[in-house]
Amino acid sequence: MEVDGRTLIRLDNVDTGGGPSDGHIDYDITDEEYALKKVKEYKNSKVAYFWHKDSNRLIEKPPSKRQGKWNTTAGVYFMYVDKVHEINDKSSCSKLSNRSIE
């Protein structure tokens, strides 16, 4: 999916946290597909979102907060990127399942 010329991608089991990095929070987002639907509805390519599997929350990650640090946790991080690069040598990649979204 593209918005403003940017492509929506997903990163499994990572988040940005450890500071006041959160924006708006949607509660009762019970599964990944519902989280993705909400992200697509927002159509805001300037913001990332994290669906926290354990608490069923979709958490906005606005760039203006600039406080989060990458960490691993159960869920899906949705973000828009300017360009998607294909990784041919996956031997140096972590076990994350990262891919663009149609």
Image (tube, helix red, strand yellow):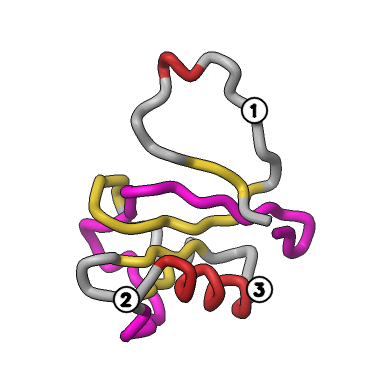
Above or below, 74 against 59 in this view is above
Front-most of residues 98 and 17: 98
Indicate the position of residue 11 as horizontal and vertical percent values. Answer: 44, 47
Indicate the position of residue 32 as horizontal and vertical percent values. Answer: 42, 66
**Is 6 positioned to the left or the right of 63 in the image?**
right
Tag 1: amino acid:
Glu
Q: Is residue 64 visible?
A: no
Instruction: Give the label on residue 16, or none.
Output: none
Q: Nearer the viewer, mark 3 or mark 2?
A: 2
- Label 1 environment density (alpha carbons within 10 Å; few <14, some 14–19, many ≥20): few
Element on which disc 3 rests? loop
Earlier in the chain: of badge 3 and badge 2, it is 3
Residue corresponding to mark 3: 43
Question: What residue is rendered at 69% in x and 46% in y?
Answer: 82
Indicate the position of residue 57 as horizontal and vertical percent values. Answer: 32, 76
Residue corresponding to mark 2: 57
Element on which disc 1 rests? loop
Question: What residue is rendered at 34% in x and 77% in y?
Answer: 30
Residue corresponding to mark 1: 86
**Is 47 positioned to the left or the right of 57 in the image?**
right
- Distance between the alpha carbons at the discs numbered 1 and 3: 24 Å
* Image: magenta residue range: 1-29
Question: What residue is rendered at 64% in x and 64% in y?
Answer: 45
Tag 2: amino acid:
Arg
Q: Nearer the viewer, mark 1 or mark 3?
A: 1
